[in-house]
């Protein structure tokens, strides 16, 4: 037995060393089982077998107040290991579902919905390349009782048994039902369950380590592509439109820009007249009224049990920054955070692509305002070839699932697309070039994006068609007139908050 353990530990260390060296994918190990099933002994064995400098173990207690203010999966997203690292999750997202079911906080249907969320989460991680290995340690009810009693009787082991363990023993049937359902509904090629029923602690630990070693070796041998492809989802059909879903606005189509980067001698063109342009006096009145209304709503007692995520998207120079500045101007800075999204950092590249957005979700009573957002995956990353076709098509499903979890956690999702035409964009580019205070906003990338106007228009149309929903609808804001767009953005956010708080 000792020789076998030594050989196995060597295999694990070799595999871990190679995974760390490559830095291509993370390894997520999940252990779950009833109290008394021996999970603690397995964890000790694994932490002795691996180099723990590249291994983290996460055992989750009841959610803290901070965690309860966000979607249930928030704390798990924050604990995900980056590429090239290992993490052991003890119970984790499965324990949450099992305990809520056993405690009567969710029904059979609620358990099924929770398991669907879990399956989608694991599928997304696998499609991003994560190696996921899940292990279940069963124990019969009578064996569990005897195990807990024997631990209690041992002066050196009695600390391991708590009142919670006996409560779980009393809930055995419900927990057993929930775990059986979970193993059926969430077992997949990309996130398989392994049932490890050995009673001998040494044999149980060796069996666990063997499963992990083999999974790591298979991945290193090159099965990553097959697993990721199996976990990918097909792109949604543009014809399968929600009853309340708007068709892509006509203004997005047929507005191909004339010319590209202007020469120094070009004269500035006048913007096209718009039907409704606000004069300064009317603009100031409506802006002040909208700002006061929004400030009042965000301070309301009812809003302290809610939160809001506000997304601003639009073409370059569409006025997102100006709209955000006017929106936040009257607000208490402690009540909001502006998240400006650019190219991902090295740290963010090492995680699933939605990870960096999960980190910025607001607690209750707060707003998170995104200047560009997760929609970059289906816009700039699609058009510029920074994400594969499979990845950006899969992202529609992942975005909808992400926003559904926000809504379920009482986080209001407000999404606005600011649309300008090509002539107006050209006029603003030229104005920025001449203005020493705005020149820094204009980059070579802006000109390159302009040359791909039609490609971006098609991506925007697909985005709206695939991600508009009753709970998280898109507002299309014509923005050739900055004043009108700014006022309408603030008024729309205020109206959505009033609706959510049932104040309208």
Image (tube, rainbow, N blue to C red):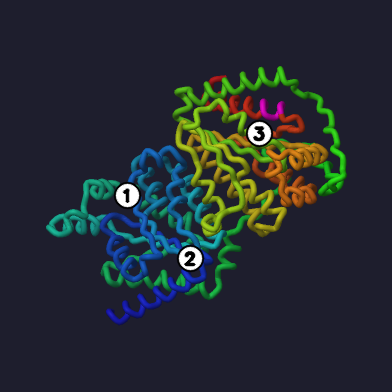
Query: Closer to the N terminus: mark 3 or mark 1?
Result: 1
Q: What element carries label 2?
A: loop
In the image, which residues are magenta? 483-488
Q: Position of residue 215 (x, y in %)?
A: 46, 70
Q: Is residue 271 left or right of residue 202?
A: right
User: Is 233 within the magenta?
Assistant: no
Pick whichever, 413 or 341, lies toward us. Answer: 341
Q: Position of residue 319 (x, y in %)?
A: 69, 36
Q: Nearer the viewer, mark 3 or mark 2?
A: 3
- Mark 1, Cα crowd under 10 Å, few <14 / some 14-19 / many 20+, is few
At a point 85% along the width and 33% down the height, the residue shown is 270
Residue under pointer 1: 173
Question: Which is the main secondary structure of the residues drawn in magenta?
Answer: helix
Q: Nearer the viewer, mark 2 or mark 1?
A: 2
Gap between marks 3 and 2 measured at Cα: 41 Å
Whether residue 272 can be seen here: yes
Query: Closer to the N terminus: mark 2 or mark 1?
Result: 2
Q: Is residue 452 positioned above or below 436 on the image?
A: below
The C terminus is located in which quarter?
top right
- Mark 2, Cα crowd under 10 Å, few <14 / some 14-19 / many 20+, is many
Pick whichever, 7 or 56, lies toward us. Answer: 56
Q: Tell me the quarter of the picture where residue 64 sits.
A: top left
At a point 51% along the width and 46% down the height, the residue shown is 358
* Tag of residue 84: 2
At a point 42% along the width and 76% down the height, the residue shown is 14
Q: Nearer the viewer, mark 3 or mark 1?
A: 3
Gap between marks 3 and 1 measured at Cα: 58 Å
Q: Where is residue 403 in the image (x, y as percent from the top left)?
A: 56, 42
Residue under pointer 3: 322
Query: Closer to the N terminus: mark 3 or mark 2?
Result: 2
Q: Is mark 1 on a helix, strand or loop?
A: helix
């Amino acid at each position: 037995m000792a020789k076998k353990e030594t050989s196995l530990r060597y295999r694990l260390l070799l595999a871990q060393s190679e995974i760390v060296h490559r830095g291509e994918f993370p390894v997520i190990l999940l252990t779950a089982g009833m109290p008394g099933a021996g999970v603690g002994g397995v964890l000790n064995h694994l932490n002795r077998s691996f180099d723990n400098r590249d291994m983290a173990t996460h055992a989750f207690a009841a959610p803290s107040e901070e965690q309860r203010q966000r979607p249930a999966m928030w704390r798990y997203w924050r604990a995900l290991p980056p590429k090239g690292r290992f993490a052991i999750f003890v119970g984790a997202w499965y324990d949450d579902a099992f305990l809520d079911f056993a405690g009567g906080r969710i029904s059979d249907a609620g358990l099924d919905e929770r398991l669907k969320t879990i399956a989608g989460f694991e599928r997304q991680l696998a499609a991003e390349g994560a190696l996921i290995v899940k292990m279940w340690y069963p124990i019969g009810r009578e064996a569990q009782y005897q195990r807990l009693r024997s631990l209690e009787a041992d002066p050196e082991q009695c600390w391991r048994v708590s009142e919670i363990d006996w409560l779980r023993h009393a809930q055995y049937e419900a927990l057993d039902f929930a775990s059986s359902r979970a193993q059926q509904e969430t077992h997949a090629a990309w996130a398989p369950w392994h049932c490890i029923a050995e009673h001998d602690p040494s044999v149980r630990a060796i069996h666990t380590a063997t499963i992990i070693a083999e999974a790591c070796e298979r991945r290193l041998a090159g099965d990553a592509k097959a697993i990721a492809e199996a976990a990918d989802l097909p792109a949604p059909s543009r014809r399968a439109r929600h009853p309340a879903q708007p068709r892509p606005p006509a203004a997005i189509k047929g507005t191909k820009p004339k010319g590209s980067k202007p020469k120094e001698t070009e004269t500035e063109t006048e913007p096209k007249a718009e039907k409704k342009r606000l004069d300064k006096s009317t603009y100031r009145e409506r802006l002040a009224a909208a700002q006061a209304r929004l400030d009042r709503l965000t301070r309301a007692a009812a809003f302290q049990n809610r939160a809001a995520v506000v997304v601003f998207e639009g073409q370059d120079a569409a006025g997102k920054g100006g709209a955000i500045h006017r929106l936040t101007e009257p607000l208490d800075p402690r009540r909001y955070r502006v998240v400006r999204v650019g190219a991902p950092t090295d740290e963010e590249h090492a995680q699933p692509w939605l990870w960096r957005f999960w980190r910025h979700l607001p607690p209750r009573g707060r707003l998170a305002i995104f200047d560009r957002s997760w929609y970059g995956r289906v816009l700039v990353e699609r058009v510029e070839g920074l994400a594969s076709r499979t990845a950006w098509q899969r992202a529609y499903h992942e975005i909808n699932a992400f926003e559904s979890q926000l809504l379920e956690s009482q986080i209001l999702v407000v999404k606005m697309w600011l649309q300008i035409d090509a002539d107006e964009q050209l006029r603003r580019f030229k104005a920025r070039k001449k203005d020493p205070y705005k020149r820094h906003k204009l980059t070579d990338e802006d000109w390159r994006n302009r040359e791909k106007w039609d490609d971006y228009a098609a991506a925007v149309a697909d985005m709206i068609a695939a991600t508009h929903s009753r709970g998280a609808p898109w507002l299309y804001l014509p923005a050739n007139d900055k004043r009108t767009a700014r006022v309408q953005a603030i008024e729309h956010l205020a109206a959505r908050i009033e609706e959510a708080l049932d104040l309208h």
